[in-house]
Amino acid sequence: MIYFDYSEFDSPDKPGSGRTMNAEFLQMLDAARHIADVPFVITSGVRTIKWNAKVGGVKGSSHIKGRAADIACSSSAQRLIIVSALLDVGFRRIGISKTFIHVDNDPDKIDAIWLY
């Protein structure tokens, strides 16, 4: 059972689009949330091509494929908890910024951890 509400993943310009999120991605994210035992506030889920361009997303973004999410993060301690849980469940593509953590499981991209 998935904890998240699909609407959390909606592209702001397309209500209901969160239902197009990849099921495997959501299962992994839900498992990580249970391990972390801290709220995962989703700031970006699936994106339309138009919305991705508007927010400055890269061409071919995993968000467009429904295989990525950005999770709000407000402290170093919370960042460690979330990233550790994401790694524990098998995520191998993680981007870290001061205010959010990007995670995806895009099979067309190489494993990496990067900074924004």
Image (cartoon, grey):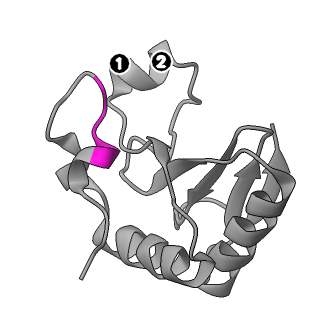
Within 10 Å of disc 2 (Cα), the crowding (few <14, some 14-19, many 20+) is few
30 above or below 88? above
Q: Position of residue 98 (x, y in %)?
A: 80, 39
Q: Position of residue 74 (x, y in %)?
A: 72, 44
For the residue pair 59 and 27, the one nearer the viewer reads as: 27
Left or right of 13 in this view: 108: right
Question: For numbered disc 2, what is the local secondary structure?
Answer: helix
Was residue 10 drawn as part of the magenta stretch in this picture? yes
Which mark is drawn over residue 50? Answer: 1
Q: Which residues are magenta?
A: 8-12
Was residue 114 drawn as part of the magenta stretch in this picture? no
* Secondary structure that dominates the magenta span: loop
- Residue at 80% x, 66% y: name it: 80
Q: Position of residue 62 (x, y in %)?
A: 49, 48
Q: Position of residue 47 (x, y in %)?
A: 37, 35
- Which residue is outermost to the left? 16
Which kind of residue does numbered mark 2 sit on? Ala
- Residue at 59% x, 30% y: name it: 58
